[in-house]
Image (tube, rainbow, N blue to C red):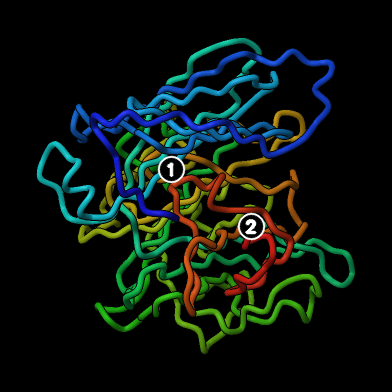
């Protein structure tokens, strides 16, 4: 991602022409003369600072526009074809820029500004407000979430091959020791939406990586794989994956385990009988990693609002999250319900989903490669928006980042 170098406070920036990135027959549609997007900076930045000279994307299922913001953070789109659009933008600031633009003393760390509006009905002239969120740029990223399962050689459903991958996107060795992996609550009827829970994430399971500090390194540009069953699954299911070289395994009697692979420790589960990662085949697999010195096992545990029995979910402070990817259920008629987002926008302003309604299609959610970088190693895309950063693929191979779809 190109680093933002010149937010200008009083410099007038000419509005660039629009770029249309698709073609369709417009003969029967009346274009909308003007659509305006006004972008607001996050809390904590200087009042005189505006989101100037940055691209805003307006995209539907069939057409895409881009426009630059002016000196006041306003982007104007002309002759827009009526449709249902998403609006998005993102910007990476260096640590020095973050310090310079903040209205208080802050730590010198790179941050990502991002904004996203989904399912905007644009059928006449209008002005939309796009509010940016801020996320501190992280070294460790969730890079693959494979949960859909597949079919075995006999055509039967196969679910033992799920895994999660974490990638070191920095230039320094990172250690996974003592970090936590969480799976967000997955009630069929939303229980703890982010919209009404701005401070906490309610998790159905929490796992902790072993180690006392520097026992489990992740080298720059490398990743670790966490599996339920660290075996070669292609022996039973040809379209599955070989997880025999996984780094960690959620040990249980449900699946075949590999004694040569380290255990990731279960700290909390909402379901007493599930000691392995509860990776659902159809979706609702929002995943996050976090770091804290607290005794997580003593965090509050809540029933679903209005109930005094049933499943209970552990309450995790959202401020401890290093990275997260929102993964929602895909519904047959309506698609994913964006109102069921459980991760706050400063963790993931977007969301992902697999195309299948019920799974068993060996679909994986993979993070894209940041093609703006160069050198002997790869970097992954990180704009704090999984709609932009990730893509759904049907090749769930661990540690594989040269897939053509990931390079787009």
* Camera-nearest residue between 362 and 56: 56
- One can see residue 192 in this view: no
Which residue bears the numbered disc 2? 408
The quadrant where residue 284 appears: top right
Q: Residue at x 63, y 47 (%)?
A: 283
Going by the picture, which residue comes out furthest to the left?
Answer: 105
Quadrant location of the N terminus in the rendered image: bottom left
Going by the picture, which residue comes out furthest to the bottom?
Answer: 260
Label 2, label 1: how many angstroms apart (C-alpha)? 17 Å
Q: Residue at x 50, y 61 (%)?
A: 372
- Percent position of residue 333, x then y: 76, 29
Chain-order first, disc 2 or disc 1: 1
- Percent position of residue 272, x then y: 49, 56
Describe residue 114's horizontal placement relative to residue 155 as left or right: left
Quadrant location of the C terminus in the rendered image: bottom right
- Percent position of residue 140, x then y: 39, 64
Circle 2: element type: loop
Q: Which mark is residue 246?
A: none
* Camera-nearest residue between 372 and 138: 372
The quadrant where residue 351 appears: top right
Circle 1: element type: strand
Which residue bears the numbered disc 1? 90
Q: Residues within 10 Å of mark 1 (few under 14, many from 20)?
A: many
Describe residue 339's horizontal placement relative to residue 347 as left or right: right
Whether residue 348 is situated above or below residue 119 in the rendered picture: below
* Camera-nearest residue between 274 and 137: 137
Q: Residue at x 70, y 16 (%)?
A: 31
Q: Residue at x 55, y 59 (%)?
A: 367
- One can see residue 134 in this view: yes
């Amino acid at each position: 991602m190109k680093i933002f170098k010149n937010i200008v406070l009083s410099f007038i920036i000419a509005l660039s022409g629009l770029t249309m990135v698709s073609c369709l027959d417009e003969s029967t549609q009346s274009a909308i003369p003007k659509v305006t997007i006004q972008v607001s900076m996050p809390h904590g930045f200087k009042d005189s600072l505006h989101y100037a000279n940055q691209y805003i994307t307006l995209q539907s299922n069939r057409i895409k526009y881009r426009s630059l913001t002016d000196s006041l953070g306003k982007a104007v789109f002309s002759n827009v074809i009526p449709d249902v659009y998403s609006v998005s933008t993102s910007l990476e600031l260096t640590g020095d820029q973050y310090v310079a633009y903040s209205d208080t003393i802050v730590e010198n760390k790179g941050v990502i500004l991002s904004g996203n509006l989904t399912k905007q009905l644009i059928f006449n002239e209008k002005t939309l407000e796009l509010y940016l969120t801020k996320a501190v740029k992280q070294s460790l990223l969730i890079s693959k979430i494979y949960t859909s399962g597949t079919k075995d050689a006999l055509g039967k459903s196969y679910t033992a091959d799920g895994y999660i991958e974490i990638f070191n996107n920095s230039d320094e060795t990172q250690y996974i020791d003592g970090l936590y992996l969480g799976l967000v609550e997955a009630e069929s009827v939303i229980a703890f939406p982010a919209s009404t829970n701005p401070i906490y994430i309610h998790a159905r399971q929490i796992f902790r990586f072993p180690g006392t500090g520097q026992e489990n390194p992740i080298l720059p540009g490398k990743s670790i794989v966490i599996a339920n069953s660290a075996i070669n699954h292609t022996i039973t299911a040809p379209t599955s994956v070989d997880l025999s070289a996984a780094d960690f395994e959620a040990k249980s009697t449900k699946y075949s385990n590999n004694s040569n692979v380290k255990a990731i420790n279960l700290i909390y589960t909402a379901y007493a009988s599930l000691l392995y990662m509860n990776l659902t085949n159809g979706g609702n697999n929002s995943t996050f990693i976090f770091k804290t010195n607290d005794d997580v096992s003593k965090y509050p545990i809540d029933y679903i609002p209005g109930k005094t029995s049933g499943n209970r979910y552990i309450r995790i402070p959202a401020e401890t999250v290093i990275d997260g990817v929102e993964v929602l259920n895909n519904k047959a008629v309506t698609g994913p319900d964006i109102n069921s987002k459980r991760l706050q926008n400063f963790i993931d302003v977007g969301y992902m989903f697999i195309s299948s309604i019920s799974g068993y299609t060996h679909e994986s959610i993979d993070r894209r490669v940041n093609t703006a970088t160069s050198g002997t190693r790869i970097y992954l895309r990180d704009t704090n928006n999984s709609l932009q950063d990730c893509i759904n693929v049907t090749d769930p191979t661990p540690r594989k980042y040269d897939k053509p779809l990931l390079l787009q």
